[in-house]
Image (cartoon, rainbow, N blue to C red):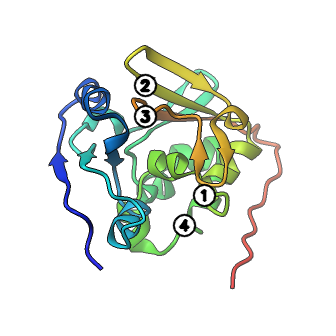
Amino acid sequence: MKPAKFEYMVPESLEEAIHCLERYGDDAKVISGGQSLIPLLSMRLSTPKYLIDLNRIKDLQYVREEGDVLAIGALTRHAEVERSAIVRKRCPLLSEAVTYIGHWQIRNRGTIGGSIAHADPTAELPCVISALRGEIVIMGPEGERTVAPEEFFLTYLLTSLDSTEIVKEVRFPYLPPTSGYAFLEVAR
């Protein structure tokens, strides 16, 4: 099956993307890596009139230490997190969990923010951010807000994101060097 017809937009900044969401509201969908959205579009389970591609917003691609948290920009690819020495040092549970995400093609294209925003309870990143009590930074027309996973994830594939908001960053607290951790995934 082919996706329904839509208008494609490529904003250069987060502010421009939010403006598009304000303008088109529920008729718009945001795409970053597309690993979750493209199949939904192809099966016509999602039929937005406007598709807003965030990939040119380079300000959302980073892994950095900020105070006592590891801050990861929403457009950072899974593969970048997987290879990051900072992630291995500061948040080894995340480093281990990200290797379970799909296969290398998905990790090369999929984004941290996309996985969190998709809110699939079987996905690795919602599990890790919940277990570590991390934070999700959201940007909208009213500015920035930071929420805990229990406020963000409402139910299966549903978040507290407003139709005019975008995941900007995810924050993971550092694990003390003496911490123990394990990530075990059971799959068919």
Q: Earlier in the sequence, mark 1 or mark 4?
A: 4
The residue located at (32%, 43%) in the rendering is: 27
Compare residues 16 and 92 and report the one nearer the observer: 16
The residue located at (42%, 14%) in the rendering is: 142
Compare residues 181 and 74 and report the one nearer the observer: 74
- Distance between mark 4 and mark 3 Cα atoms: 27 Å
- Distance between mark 1 and mark 2 Cα atoms: 21 Å
Q: Which residue is mark 2?
A: 139
Q: Earlier in the sequence, mark 4 or mark 2?
A: 4
* Residue 74 in picture, x, y percent from top left: 43, 41
Q: Earlier in the sequence, mark 4 or mark 3?
A: 4
Q: Which residue is mark 3?
A: 163
Compare residues 184 and 143 and report the one nearer the observer: 143
Q: Earlier in the sequence, mark 3 or mark 1?
A: 1
**What number is the disc on residue 120?**
1
Compare residues 30 and 144 and report the one nearer the observer: 30
* Residue 85 in picture, x, y percent from top left: 51, 49
Name the front one of labels 4 and 2. Answer: 2
**What number is the disc on residue 82?**
none
Q: Which amino acid type corresponds to the residue marked 2 in the rendered image? A: Met
- Distance between mark 4 and mark 2 Cα atoms: 26 Å
